[in-house]
Image: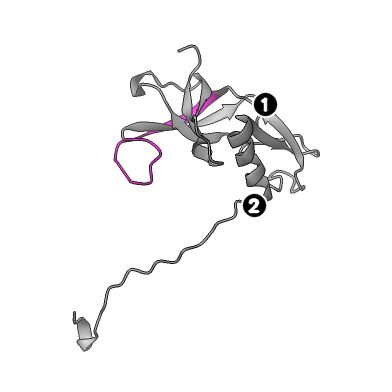
Amino acid sequence: MEGKNNVLISEQVLQVPYNYSAGPVASRFLVSLRDERKILGIRCNTCGKVYVPPRGTCGACFCQLEDWVEVGPEGTLSNFTVINYPEPVHPASAPFALGIILLSGADTGLVHVVRAPLEKIKIGMRLKPVFTKKRRGHILDIEGFEPVGI
């Protein structure tokens, strides 16, 4: 195919296989989901802030984080959005809701699928995780969060 200035343009698909390491902090979080169905956070020993998902450094005081704590499993929906269009990378079929869930004992929110009828989703509702039967060490080992008491 010829382009401007008689330059030949050839389209190709380049595949570059690679492995991605989640690192020691995210790996411990994901292994806990997979093996124990527990959600772990990490607490700063200086300011006391609990991060979920966990991270290596405190965003408030920049200290190294090493104090693992179990959080939740229930939490409160602090915000959400409805996804109305399908994409192959989406964790659910459109339309669906993604929410920020503030798990009990955590100071930061976890973004995940809210499994409830869209018209019933409300900020402040209590949610609990639904784990997959076959877990593989992935954030989607939690299928989503559903309302407590339903």
Residue at 58% of width from left, 22% of height from top? 74
Residue span colored magenta: 76-93
Q: Secondary structure at mark 1?
A: loop
**Residue with the mark numbered 1:** 105
| Vertical comparison of 98 with 125: above or below | below
| Of the two numbered discs 2 and 1 in the rendering, the one whose residue sits closer to the viewer | 2
Q: Nearer the viewer, residue 122 or 141?
A: 141
Residue 22 located left or right of residue 70: left
Q: Nearer the viewer, residue 136 or 69?
A: 136
The location of residue 23, given as percent across then percent down, is: 64, 52
**Residue with the mark numbered 2:** 23
Indicate whether residue 77 is drawn in magenta.
yes
Indicate whether residue 11 is drawn in magenta.
no
User: Which mark is drawn over residue 60?
Assistant: none
Mark 1 is on which residue type?
Gly
Res. 118 visible in picture: yes
Q: Residue furthest right?
A: 46
Q: Nearer the viewer, residue 6 or 47?
A: 6
Residue at 51% of width from left, 15% of height from top? 148
Residue 13 located left or right of residue 76: left
Residue at 70% of width from left, 38% of height from top? 42
The location of residue 108, given as percent across then percent down, is: 61, 35
Who comes first in sequence, dot 2 or dot 1?
2
Q: Dividing the picture into quarters, in which one does residue 109 lie?
A: top right
